[in-house]
Image (spheres, rainbow, N blue to C red):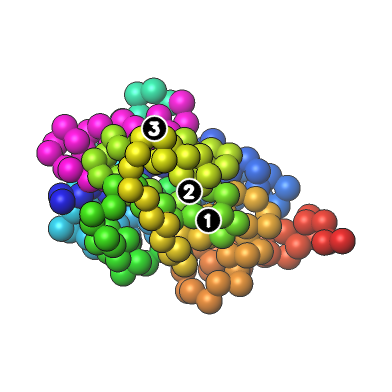
Amino acid sequence: MTLAIVVPVKSPRRAKHRLEPVLSEPEREQLAGVMAREVFAAVTTLTMYGRFVISDDPDILEEGRRFGLEPLVDRIGQGQSAAVRQGFAAAWERGFTAALTIPGDVPAVTPRELSDLCTYRPEIEVVLAPDRERLGTNGLRLVPPHAITLRFGEDSFSLHQAEARRANRSLAVRDVEGLRYDLDRPEDVIAFMQLPRDTATRRLLQELGVADRALASTPPYA
């Protein structure tokens, strides 16, 4: 199995609108950039694999290039599934027989976690790493890269499992601590800040006092 890692990254200028209750537009743009760089830093260490970043933002592509990722221009601009599909197709065209994608907003993931996910049970055609609520998909490894139809978005964890069953593909779920924490909503910030990992994203959120804003904006549980 020869594997490529594909990281789709939305332009920071359009990212993280659901954090608007706790972050200004410049703060959201800053956060998105810091998170992407932390993901690039984790991926760049895995030199035995192909490494790609796909985006429609030239600055993000150049940032990925500086970290050793091959830049791919998102020519469709229709969301995560379309971006990953383009990236996986590029990997397949370059001779990679497997592909792993993680988003650009999982800044706690470590190189060791990614390496373990890349090598986990290579005979399995579809490997899913869910988010902390087991609703979204924050890691997806396919053998081959076109093994199933991509269904990123709402409830993608269940949808990707359904696609694997529909395509009669072998399936495994792998819980990866650093991939459980993406940052889309104020409650995600609260959960992320409870994770005992020192990251640039954590330091930025502390500097901005975002956790306190998030707690104030999140309704208490009944």
Q: CA distance from mark 3 to mark 1?
A: 19 Å
Q: Nearer the viewer, residue 222 or 33?
A: 222
Quarter of the figure with the C terminus = bottom right
In this picture, which residue range is highlighted in magenta?
78-100
Q: Nearer the viewer, residue 31 or 166?
A: 166
Q: Earlier in the sequence, mark 3 or mark 2?
A: 2
Q: CA distance from mark 3 to mark 2?
A: 13 Å
Query: In the rendered structure, which amino acid carries the disc numbered 3?
Result: Thr
Q: Quadrant of residue 98?
A: top left
Q: Is residue 34 left or right of residue 127?
A: right
Q: Which residue ends up furthest to the top in the rendered image?
A: 76
Label number found at residue 137? 2
Is 10 part of what is drawn in magenta?
A: no
Residue for badge 1: 131
Residue for badge 3: 149
Question: Residue 61, how many percent across, how many down?
Answer: 32, 40
